[in-house]
Image (cartoon, coloured by chain):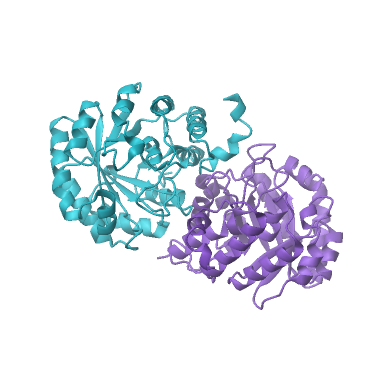
Chain colours: A cyan, B purple
Amino acid sequence: MSRWPAKVTIKEVGPRDGLQNETAPVATADKIAWINLLSESGLSYIEVTSFVHPKWIPQLADAAEVAAGIRRKDGVTYAALVPNERGLERALAAGIDEVGVFMSASETHNQKNINKTISATFPVLEGVVKTAKQEGKTVRGYVSTVFGCPYEGAVPVDQVLTVADWLFAMGIDELSLGDTIGVATPKQVVDVLAEVLRRFPAGRIAMHFHDTRGTALANILVSMEMGITIFDSSLGGLGGCPYAPGASGNVATDDFVYMLHGMGIETGIDMERLTKAALFIRDKIGRPLSSRYLQTISSSTEKDM
Amino acid sequence: MSRWPAKVTIKEVGPRDGLQNETAPVATADKIAWINLLSESGLSYIEVTSFVHPKWIPQLADAAEVAAGIRRKDGVTYAALVPNERGLERALAAGIDEVGVFMSASETHNQKNINKTISATFPVLEGVVKTAKQEGKTVRGYVSTVFGCPYEGAVPVDQVLTVADWLFAMGIDELSLGDTIGVATPKQVVDVLAEVLRRFPAGRIAMHFHDTRGTALANILVSMEMGITIFDSSLGGLGGCPYAPGASGNVATDDFVYMLHGMGIETGIDMERLTKAALFIRDKIGRPLSSRYLQTISSSTEKDM
């Protein structure tokens, strides 16, 4: 059966994309303990923080302490976002394995999110990518608002392609296409991916869906059918974008893994350990998370874990 | 583009499958007002209640009053469940358009849900179907636990086919296959539907998914790709099954319509009116509903509606 892949790589973005959107700060020690639980769950990639200026995202002001405090497990890539050369310096000093650079496909979101026009963003990221590669790091590019912008509405696919062209030309290794406000439906995903995959190989494209309107797993399904095997998700459905009004969480890693395992698709993840990590962060956040899966095990399994 | 249908029929089961699972009763007048709002939303089919004995589902003890009180709109089918001949008499007296009969694919769930073995259920339903058809009604069959049973776990597809064979042989017009506890994943849906569609035409099969683990829209997507165009859903994600521990709501009509309209698939439904109906019942229930879509509009649009 070749309709779906045999194996999928899940990139856990909860410690960054999830926690950056929580108003109540999570203690540094709790972040570290959580990431250590994630490392033990079988995940092969964890985006642990972002080296943005604390003025912009105070929730991640402890980026260096988190990176220094976690127990690094062999075979796991520990990644972080960096907005500029200063952020990159901090990330390199912290021994981050992979660097993520980010921008938006829509002008207004790019300006609100990183305070620059799209064209002014390119040279900044170009410098970051160049230095990171010189330092022997792999680099991941993120494009936000691929399927819609909270300020501009529909985003023409040409804008996505332009940004993607630039980022790959700079030398990024992989590109993650983000449905930042969770508006995409499967037909749009098929249409956008058809254009993207005409230019770039599927193995270098990741999809980053938010489940704001419940369509994330359906969008993942059609993406897999087009050859995509790398997906970003956030445990428990934590996350969103502080500059995108109405955007709720990333697709929940636990819902996603439940679906994949039910379809016989390998992830390398141990569901029981993953659940343990989800319950840990839920308790620290102190409110129910938006994951569906987690709600089914809360009352029954929780006591035993 | 023929991968997905041009048009889908949504059968709203919230007033029955949703409200039967609410512990706080909803006033009869509120149910009537809600169903009237649903009628105005463009839905063509509303399952308004169940004529089971009030001892079993006290939430629907007002079945006759609800059926008598609603404003019937031309072109809308008003349906109700009936468990036996006595229920059918009450449904006929109430002027219900279509009758639904129900049983489970798994022995234990059937016994817990309707207090009979599967083989003892057949003759009861046969009598109901016969009388209903004599009275000129169409009849819908429901099979529960098609993709898994809360008591028995996996349910062999042969049990589903056996029950389906019996129900169609009795003369039902349409069969709704229920993922009562929301465990199905797309691969399982494809596997089960492949067997079902070998025997019965797609036009007579409906799918009834619960979103307990977040997979409902992905399951609907693959069902559409196999030719299914009739789906049950519940506005706001209300619902479940009182005899299936851990089963949370039906797939939310509003999430579902959002996805379909985003894909250019016609439903005949006006999203604004549907949202108005969702906010109405949410206020009566008095807690946030599980629909994702509804959460995005609560803070912004609500005041204007």
Name the image quarter holding the N terminus of chain A.
top left
| Vertical comparison of A134 with B163: above or below | above
What percent of the width, then of the height, locates residue A265?
A: 44, 38
Name the image quarter holding the C terminus of chain A.
top right
| Rendering quarter of residue A97 | top left
Along the line of sight, the residue nearer the viewer: B54 or A290: A290
Q: Which residue is outermost to the front?
A: A55
| Vertical comparison of A259 with B56: above or below | above
Along the line of sight, the residue nearer the viewer: B207 or B159: B207
Q: Is residue A242 visible?
A: yes
What percent of the width, then of the height, locates residue A98?
A: 25, 33
Q: Is residue B200 visible?
A: no
What percent of the width, then of the height, locates residue A71?
A: 35, 21
The residue shown at (68%, 40%) is B245
Count of numbered circles in the view: 0
| Vertical comparison of B304 with A96: above or below | below
The residue shown at (36%, 46%) is A208
What percent of the width, then of the height, locates residue A88?
A: 20, 35
Q: Which residue is outermost to the bottom?
A: B74
Along the line of sight, the residue nearer the viewer: A193 or B14: B14
| Vertical comparison of A120 with A239: above or below | below
The residue shown at (49%, 32%) is A284
